[in-house]
Amino acid sequence: QAAVVRRALHNQVQELKGNIRVFCRVRPPSKDGREERVDGGGGRDGDKPLLSLATRGEMAGRRVCVAPPGGTKAFEFDFDRVFGADASQRDVFEEISHLVQSALDGYKVCVFTYGQTGSGKTYTMLGDGEDDERERDDHSRLDGEPLDGEEGETNPSRGLIPRSIEQIFAARDAAAAAAAEDRGATPPSLEVTASMIEIYNEDIIDLLGPKSSSSSGSTTKHDVKHDASGKTTVTGLR
């Protein structure tokens, strides 16, 4: 009964926040040696920051102000949440983790990133992969010692996708542990399946399928189907 109440309250809160939310994440300056300053050079006289985030008032953490060089007017853009250049992967996932819980509760959830090339979409979703390389080379990682970075995390750069998967399996293990403590309770049955597709030029490509199926010359055709219950599936996936 407590789980039912928690589920209902949690998803009521998510609906109040909005079924469609738009977040903005500011990419920090690149590390390739190019100078990228945003604290000056904006406005007609170049004395205003090119990009600034609201830190006070009701729009704090939700508004971005852009002052084009040589321009006489600054432009304000409002979002449900703005993450500054110093925001960590954990900071971003804290917002997304509530939606992962909603998915575990049976709700449909979609999270995607949008932006120009080099804006940080892949990093946000997956991470940079550098810590994965270090994990293979650093055997001390096997002892659970965290790397430099976020306290308690052995791989702080991992993105939304690996963190979401971790949360799903952590929920599975927690449910099984709770059932084990409650003698006589039926252990929960949880099946986890995954698919990964790419939509390119309106063609659906199965990235986990045979090599031939993920090539541009594949003859395998995948269609999106909706059944009477509202379930959406893609045909022919591995």
Image (tube, grey):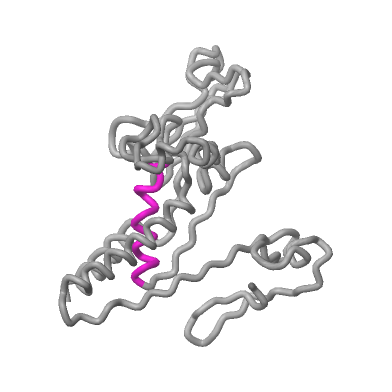
Q: Is residue 29 left or right of residue 95?
A: right
| Residue 70 against residue 95 in the figure, above or below | above
User: Which of the image's four quarters has the N terminus?
Assistant: bottom left
Is residue 73 visible in the rendered structure shown here? no
Q: Does the magenta stretch include residue 81?
A: no
The count of marks equals 0
Q: In this view, does 230 lie to the left or right of 69?
A: left
| Residue 39 against residue 198 in the figure, above or below | above
The residue that appears at 70% across and 66% down in the rendered structure is 204
| Residue 20 against residue 195 in the figure, above or below | above
Q: Where is residue 17 in the image (x, y as percent from the top left)?
A: 33, 56
Q: Is residue 100 magenta?
A: yes
| Residue 9 against residue 27 in the figure, above or below | below
Is residue 182 visible in the rendered structure shown here? yes
Q: In this view, does 56 lie to the left or right of 126?
A: left
Of residue 102 and residue 156, the one placed in the foreground of this image is: 156
Q: Where is residue 157 in the image (x, y as percent from the top left)?
A: 46, 39
Magenta part mainly helix, strand or loop? helix
The residue that appears at 39% across and 70% down in the rendered structure is 107
The residue that appears at 35% across and 35% down in the rendered structure is 150
Q: Residue furthest toward the front?
A: 139
Of residue 211 and residue 15, the one placed in the foreground of this image is: 211
Q: Position of residue 39 (x, y in %)?
A: 48, 18
Q: Position of residue 19 (x, y in %)?
A: 40, 62
The residue that appears at 50% across and 13% down in the rendered structure is 47
Q: Where is residue 152, by image quadrant? A: top left
Of residue 207 and residue 221, the one placed in the foreground of this image is: 207
Q: Is residue 68 left or right of residue 138?
A: right
User: Which of the image's four quarters has the C terminus?
Assistant: bottom right
In magenta, the rendered stretch is 89-105
